[in-house]
Image (cartoon, rainbow, N blue to C red):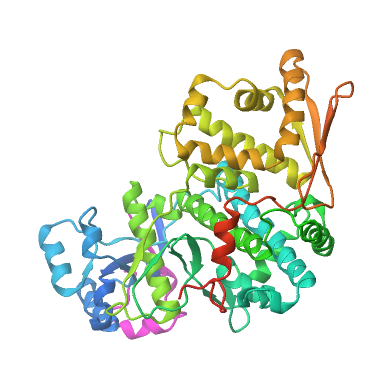
Amino acid sequence: MAFRSDTTLNDDPNGLRFWEQHDLIDDQLVVTPARSSLECIIYFDPQRREFLDFDRIEEKVSAELAPRHRVFRFEPLTGENMASWSPFLTPEAERAFLRHGYGRAPVGLSSGIPRPPRPVGSPEKNRTLNLNYDAFYGLAAKLNATLRAIQDIRPAGALPAWLRRDPAEILQPVCGCLPRNGEDKLGIPLTRQGDLWLGCNDFKRSQVIFPAVAATPATAVTKGREVRVRWYGLSQEKMRAQIRRELTDCLDNDVDGFDLPALALFMCQNVMMLRLAAEAVRRRFAASRDQYDDDRRVRDHEDLNLSLKIEGAHDIDPALVRLQIEHWEPTLAERTLIGFYGGTAPVPSHNSTTEVLRIERLARWVGELRRGCHADLDPATAADILGIFERPSPEFLDLFDHRVAWSPFAVLDSLIGGAGWTVLREAALRVVERSVPFSVSYALSGQGQRLPGANVDLPNRHVTVFGPALLLPIENGSELRDQARVISPRGLYVD
């Protein structure tokens, strides 16, 4: 037999004789180490955790399953989860779980048994995750340079208190983590207050949390400086100098509606939005999809684990503070900005029309042009430009009867300005009529105000667009200006 009749010998890892070192299971087709031959999952109700004695539970279940040695694993499960899915085979087992706060699932074979190897990741998964993390890191590094440039050109007394802090401190709730004890990281969950995304590190009352990926500011900025990610190929210091010139130009020329705190807040909110988009994609490829066979069960599993992680990290008493997990659904305008920054988000429903997705697709192309300073104007992209700016279809024109559709178009229109789109429309006509691609370059102008800056070289099939490193002018500038002045001196944390 593969277990000791004298179980005290199990404390000695070298105490097994050679014929006791393996179990032969399933007619000798599977061989597994005897020490971890079978696994037992014990489900427990996290809402009753403080009343449960986990050592006593494991001891009791172990006695029920003796004499074979087991590996025990505790998994959270609530009564609400059981309304849509239950691991228990009988109503009696379910009632016992609800009565006692824990219950043993049917015994399964442990991870010690050879299983088909899981793929590390499909090309689609790896590519999509990398797109979103790169967008997050790249904009975080650009934001860091912007914050430092703002503090270079403005005395502290002229800025709101939250914007006077060290950029690394400003970025902590924006990026979602702060370092603690060297390598340990304390998460800062993301929540919503009014129209703003804020970090949450105070759980005196119940909070609504939105799942989002997170990184320490140092990690995000460091990764955002990598050559393949950073904007315009500029180092952090050159980016800071470029942005400083643009900000000074806007201030010197008294550009209408320009405001430094509003710009900083706008960029902070966009970094948080990219974290939300990255989490939505991460969940689409989550490992829990291998365990559960429908989206609701995957979501419930992920939400419950997130709640437990937050409660543990922030020492929350679940009896006094309730965490509610909500799922972010990006608007079409937000999807347009996400595409511009290089990220992506799962399409929320099949109701998105081809015309709306065309805006998002073109925003992604403009983002590639601006971040990398070069892009090819191929027939497909040219058709998108003409289909939006030159020869809009009746279906596209119908969209403008609805604000939800007009908003993403307004965002797209602002990405390179009227002069840029006018020249691109001219080139797009040539591309479509003659089936020859054009090359397009984006040159930094050194000016923050958007002046006419684009030309087309038809003989050489090349377009040059001139513009700032920053995304100016910003949408909803007056509203952001008012919000930026009432933010707590602590920064972008919920009150």
Q: In front: 375, or 470?
A: 470
- Seen in the image, is 98 located left or right of residue 32? left
Q: In front: 114, or 391?
A: 391
- Seen in the image, is 483 located left or right of residue 204? right
Q: In front: 424, or 98?
A: 424
Q: Where is residue 55, by image quadrant?
A: bottom left
Q: Which residue is drawn at 80% across and 26% down?
A: 438
Q: Does the rendering let one see residue 282?
A: yes
Q: What stretch is highlighted in magenta?
A: 1-25
Report x, y in % for residue 456: 84, 28
- Seen in the image, is 227 located left or right of residue 75? right
Image quarter of the C terminus: bottom left
In the picture as drawn, the residue positioned furthest to the left comes out as 92
Q: Which residue is drawn at 77% across and 67% down?
A: 149
Instruction: Identify whether 394 is placed above or below 343.
Output: above
Q: Does the rendering let one see residue 214?
A: no
Report x, y in % for residue 73: 34, 70
| Residue 17 lies in the magenta stretch | yes
Count of numbered marks = 0
Q: Residue at x 72, y 78 (%)?
A: 156
Q: Where is residue 427, by image quadrant?
A: top right
| Residue 484 lies in the magenta stretch | no
- Seen in the image, is 88 located left or right of residue 372? left
In the picture as drawn, the residue positioned furthest to the right comes out as 459
Report x, y in % for residue 414: 66, 42
Instruction: Identify whether 58 is placed above or below 228.
Output: below
Instruction: Identify whether 445 is placed above or below 435.
Output: below
Report x, y in % for residue 331: 47, 45
Q: Where is residue 4, by image quadrant?
A: bottom left
